[in-house]
Image: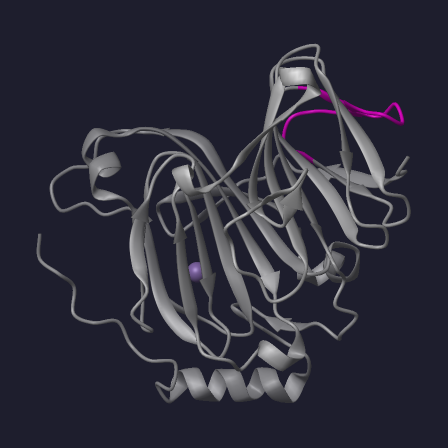
Amino acid sequence: MKKLLFSQTTEQRHWVGDGFPVRSIFSYNDRAQEMSPFLLMDYAGPAIFPAATANERRGVGEHPHRGFETVTIVYDGQVEHRDSAGGGGIIGPGDVQWMTAASGLVHEEFHGPDFAKKGGRFEMVQLWVNLPRAYKMSPPRYQGILSDQIPVVSVAQGAGTARIIAGEFEGQKGPAMTFSSINLWDIRLTAGAAAEFTVPQGQTASVFVLDGKVRLGTGESLPEASLAVLDPQGERFTLAAESDAKILFMGGEPLHEPVVGYGPFVMNSKAEILQAITDYQLGRMGQLAQEVVR
Ligand code: MN
């Protein structure tokens, strides 16, 4: 049975642009090695937005990234994205956007048009996933993964489900293409259910509780919005739901490479960060096409 290394949570929210009221659950500044290859997790919402007024667009405008991937999981609401490499799309509840910034791009992230028009409940997770050194300067890529492409596996004798976004569980493979071994599962358990999970020995492993109260097999209780980081040693862990629970499992092969980050750039050395800043300032990460008029 895997041991709990530590758990953490935060009450503090800040706005990313004017669209995303975010709790920063972990970041590469303090947890780069324990969480590798995951660099950062922002938990946006849950929040209720009113219907947008005419011409109002909530979100965050053009900004760059280099050296990693952004993975956006929408639980409620709608997110629209465009990038300078030609990637883009609108994703809704259950959908995932897996954007490989790699050598660099600029993008914008806004509430989707249908959601903006009506308003309502918004809940989203954005993960930053590090790239191995060999892929940090490879071309950008965009994967829009819709809910019906994500296999659903039954757990806890049918009292729960796991949607396999990336990696593999009980023979079901997730659709996301990744550059290193990653498991990313959207787990739901009904109150009273307990499920056992097996993951590769030696990989990092953590669970984030979005909703409900969850107890680890080792006894610790995890409240809402808490992250539990498990020992890479051992292959099995169990989650018991004391109320209906919504849980994100993140696991992966640690990269064992230096992590040097500065805002939207995460590389292996300070020289590479300075190069990223220069390249962005010189427009080498591209620019967004003129906005489409709707
Ligand atoms: Mn971004």
Q: 55 above or below 38?
A: above
- Direction front: furthest residue: 171
The image quadrant of residue 214 is: top right
Choose between 86 and 176: the one closer to the eye. 176
> Which residue reaches farthest left?
293
User: Is residue 229 left or right of 88 when viewed as pictured?
Assistant: right
Residue at left offset 58%, top offset 77%: 135
Residue visible at 35% across and 65% down in the picture: 107
Image quadrant holding the N terminus, namely top right
Query: Can residue 291 be found in the magenta stretch?
Result: no
The quadrant of the rendered image in which ligand 1 is seen is: bottom left
* Quarter of the view holding residue 38: bottom right
x 43%, y 43%: residue: 149
Q: Position of residue 80 (x, y in %)?
A: 30, 50
- Range covered by the magenta-colored residues: 213-226
Q: Can you give x and y, in whole percent of width and height, for residue 263 in the image?
A: 55, 68
